[in-house]
Amino acid sequence: MADLMTAVRVHAIGGPEVLRPELVPRPEPGPGEVLVEVHAAGVNPPDWYARSGFTLIPPQLRPVPVLPFTPGTDVSGVVAAVGPGVRRWRPGDAVFGLLRFPTTVGAARGYAEYTTAPEGDLAAKPAGLEHVRAAAVPMAGLTAWQFATEHAPVRGGETVLVNGAAGGVGHLLVQLAKRAGADVVAVASGRHAAFLQGLGVKRFVDYTTTAVAAEIHDVDLLFDTVGGPHAHRLVAALRDGGVLAPVFYGDYGDEQLARRGIRRQSGQVRSHGGQLAELAGLLAAGELRVELDSVHPLTDAPAAHARAEQGHLQGKIVLDVTGGRV
Ligand SMILES: NC(=O)c1ccc[n+]([C@@H]2O[C@H](COP(=O)([O-])OP(=O)(O)OC[C@H]3O[C@@H](n4cnc5c(N)ncnc54)[C@H](OP(=O)(O)O)[C@@H]3O)[C@@H](O)[C@H]2O)c1
């Protein structure tokens, strides 16, 4: 009989309570894959979008979840075995990665004691970074990296506004933009003021007490990690001819963008072990830090999703997978 392991599974679409820790067979790595003993798994919006039926995604783009599934795309752990043809990794290597994204949406089976991973999705975990912190990085870090270097490259001397600046993607975008030499304006609720000032932002604006676009003008580049029906209100902070980089869906008013010559630059994050290795270098050098909002045992995955849905995150939510079995 196959070895058993604990994995969190979703058998029916619903609230956080549908996340159930169960004993399931340990997977086997296929060609080009490694088996990772997971020490920690990051929690990301697509995990809970999938669990709740993707209701926040516009209907025409909404994927159909295949039940049952194990959520989780971000893991940090140790290579336990390698499949045929794997050259980069050996048993015992400490690795982290964003797995199979976007092909599996939020269901790459990261919320488990073991998971399989394409070898190219992984990077070596920095030795000084604990697994719970490394697991917080992959999706948010690669999103920030791909936005700040590919979709809407940040240039030194620019003024960059990050909306949702304290969140998983936001706080990493703040740091990458600052590192590229930009002056960063951070927009978030007031509870995050000290945290964001500690990351070296030039200006902090509390959107709960201030009409942002009445205070801030002539921004060169706007990274919006919030979106939504009121997203167009922030566009007034951009200069004519500036760049709007939406990280999520939002109503920005195409007419206004065209009239003012504002370019929209966006994209979908994808797995990339090479870019993650670049982020690992910055983390190891202390040039980038990842903040933890909260850490929950794997078997408390419902509490982690309940926290995610409360909003107002400061950094990332992570599941500690070393803490016990069902
Ligand atoms: N394009 C892609 O490939 C891609 C990749 C990753 C994520 N995403 C999307 O990007 C979004 C952000 O992801 P995330 O992981 O960073 O989420 P998150 O960790 O939950 O962060 C969201 C942040 O936005 C802040 N916020 C909420 N409402 C706000 C408002 N009206 N104005 C300003 N800030 C507000 C929240 O805190 P406060 O309200 O307390 O400030 C929170 O810190 C999600 O919708 C996700 O699906 C897209």
Image (tube, grey):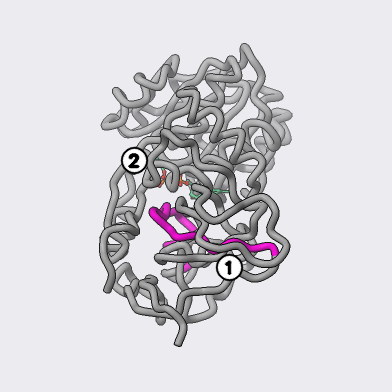
The residue segment tinted magenta is 32-50
**Quadrant location, ligand no. 1:** top left
- Amino acid marked by disc 2: Leu
Percent x, y of residue 126: 49, 36
Q: How many C-alpha atoms fall within 10 Å of the one at disc 1: few (<14), some, or many (≥20)?
A: some
Of circles 2 and 1, the one toward us is 2
For image coordinates 50% across by 36% down, the residue present is 233
Residue at the spot x=43%, y=58% of the render? Answer: 38
Label 1: which secondary element: loop
Q: Looking at this view, is 198 or 205 the one in front? A: 198
Q: Is mark 2 within 8 Å of ligand 1?
A: no
Q: Residue at x 49, y 49 (%)?
A: 228
Place of residue 235 in the rendered image (x, y in percent of width and height, measured from the top left):
56, 32
Which kind of residue does numbered mark 1 sit on?
A: Arg
How many residues crowd mark 2 within 10 Å: few (<14), some (14–19), many (20+)? Answer: some
From the top left corner, tell me how far across and down residue 112 is, in percent.
41, 66
Provide the residue designation for mark 1. 62
Disc marking residue 292: 2
Q: Position of residue 96 (x, y in %)?
A: 51, 48
Residue at the location (55% across, 50% down)?
97
Please state, as top left, top right, bottom left or bottom right, where the N terminus lies in the image. Answer: bottom left
Residue 212's label in the rendered image is none
The verdict on residue 36 being magenta is yes
**Relative to 94, 276 lies left or right:** right
